[in-house]
Image: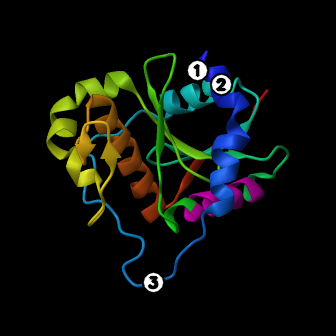
Amino acid sequence: MMRRSFLAGLDAVFGAAGAKAQPQDKPGFPPVPAWHPSFAQPLDRIADRVRYYLDGKRDFALFGHGTFAILADGLSDDAARMAALAALAGVYGAHPDMNPLPMDDGNILVRYSHYTGTVVLSDVAKAHWAEIEAKHLNGLTTDEVLITPLGPNKFDDFGKQALLGRAYMFLDAQAPEVVAIHRHG
């Protein structure tokens, strides 16, 4: 059920936000979090989940820490890489607002603008919960305040995992490397 609503709402979620975000060019921008998770998620499983969430109907590029960028159909490999790099740069160069979504398989999809996202695998998060619990606040950037139902910068387990996903996105954005292009069909 969540998978279908994700696919059906791609333009509404990714497209509209992507149109507003504009890169900034100021010293110290963009701010980045201090958290560099000590563990990685298996990229083959991330790719499998992204393919599932997209109903196997869209091409996407995968970065080294698991961030993905949804691609237009029919791009050559070079054009796909360039489009993915541009999409991630668009998120990184603007304030990288996140919109986490619980998925029907128990994982969390952290969405950003420019048709990009990160998947947090629930079993990987559970296996590394001690680090997530101890370091999730280091996933905030300098002077950043996120308002949650629990209060400013107070996170439940879902929010802590969302910050993990965003930390991976920041790692990908700081050293972007497209490691795979996945084609639909």
Asked if residue 70 lies left or right of residue 164, the reply is right
Depth order, front residue of 89/144 = 144
For residue 80: magenta? Answer: yes
State the residue position of label 3.
26
Q: CA distance from mark 2 to mark 3?
A: 37 Å
Q: Residue at x 25, y 43 (%)?
A: 151
- Density class for disc 3 (Cα within 10 Å; few <14, some 14-19, many ≥20) is few
Q: Is residue 146 visible?
A: yes
Coordinates of residue 50 in the picture (x, y in percent): 59, 31
For residue 105: magenta? Answer: no
The label shown at residue 5 is 2
Residue type at numbered disc 3: Lys
Q: Residue at x 85, y 46 (%)?
A: 74
Q: CA distance from mark 1 to mark 3?
A: 38 Å
Q: Residue at x 39, y 42 (%)?
A: 165
Q: Residue at x 44, y 51 (%)?
A: 169
Coordinates of residue 185 in the picture (x, y in percent): 79, 26
Magenta residue span: 79-90
Residue furthest right as drawn: 74
1 and 2 marks in contact (CB < 8 Å)? yes
Q: CA distance from mark 1 to mark 2?
A: 5 Å
